[in-house]
Amino acid sequence: MFETPLLFVHGTGHAAWSWDEYFLPYFAEKGFDAYALSLRGHGKSDGYEALKWTSVADYVSDVVRVASDLPEKPVVIGHSLGGLVVQKYLEKNEAPAAILITPSPSEGMFWSAFWMPYKHPILMMKIGFHQDYSLMFATPELAKKFLFSKDTDIEKIARYVKKFGKESYWANLESMFNLPKPEEISTQMLVLGADEDALVSKRAIEKTARVYNADLKFFPQTGHDLPLEDNWQEVADHMIEWLGVKIR
């Protein structure tokens, strides 16, 4: 039994269900006390009416609240936008370790997303008009383009698209400009990247690992949504191996 609890924080438009799919039962089977929260306005949590202007600080307070209810300080694990939430959480809160999975990088999303208006002008105009970044994943075809590898089955993706929800427009904007402060973070860390990530560049993931002096691992033939990709178990096993070394 691994005594230190794990707290999983989901990414844009996802909720706790994205961890329930594979990771939570697998980590429990391996002896971990694993938890996942749905940030406000996601899943079964309250806050939908104010979601558009919900801030990253609001999300951090959600993590603080859940973490404080656990028997001891958890390892915090964040995917995508949840990776930014974890980084901001660590500025003021201690954790025995942290894992960032294809995270919003330490330098922010601005440079990773800089090319988007040029490659996808109509989509980005729709996002700006509706103030809704979840439009990037509104169809199985779009979700495959931005979240998954080219080999991921479209029917599987369609099942996930039905579960995707809205995301805070403000929090997504903050991911470009409300940058983490690595100088205030000393937590031992693992950063995981995907070779086919269409949202966060390999350079940005490498830089994130470098500024935190973190261990780094890229997974081949995978997209941004590593927790839901076909090779999720390879990702989970690497995390378990790392935790076994870092957490005594």
Image (spheres, grey):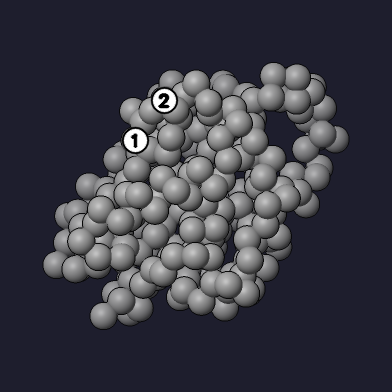
Left or right of residue 15: residue 176: right
Q: Which mark is residue 246?
A: none
Q: Quadrant of the C terminus?
A: bottom left
Q: Which numbered disc flags the more N-terminal residue, 1 or 2?
A: 1
The amino acid type, in three-letter code, at marker 1 is Trp
Q: Residue furthest right?
A: 118
Bin the neighbour count of mark 1 within 10 Å (Cα to Cα): few under 14, some 14-19, many 20 and up: many
Q: CA distance from mark 1 to mark 2?
A: 8 Å
Say if 113 sits above or below 41 in the image: below
Q: Which residue is mark 1?
A: 17
**Does any portion of residue 180 appear in the rendered image?**
yes
User: In which quadrant is the N terminus drawn?
Assistant: bottom left
Residue indicated by mark 2: 163
From the top left corner, tell me how far across and down residue 194 is, in percent.
56, 54
x, y percent for residue 115:
81, 42
Q: In the displayed structure, does residue 90 sit left or right of residue 200?
A: left
**Which residue is pictured at 78% across the width and 52% down the height?**
111
Q: Is residue 155 left or right of residue 33?
A: right
Circles 1 and 2, Cβ within 8 Å, touching? The answer is yes
Q: Is residue 148 above or below residue 176?
A: above
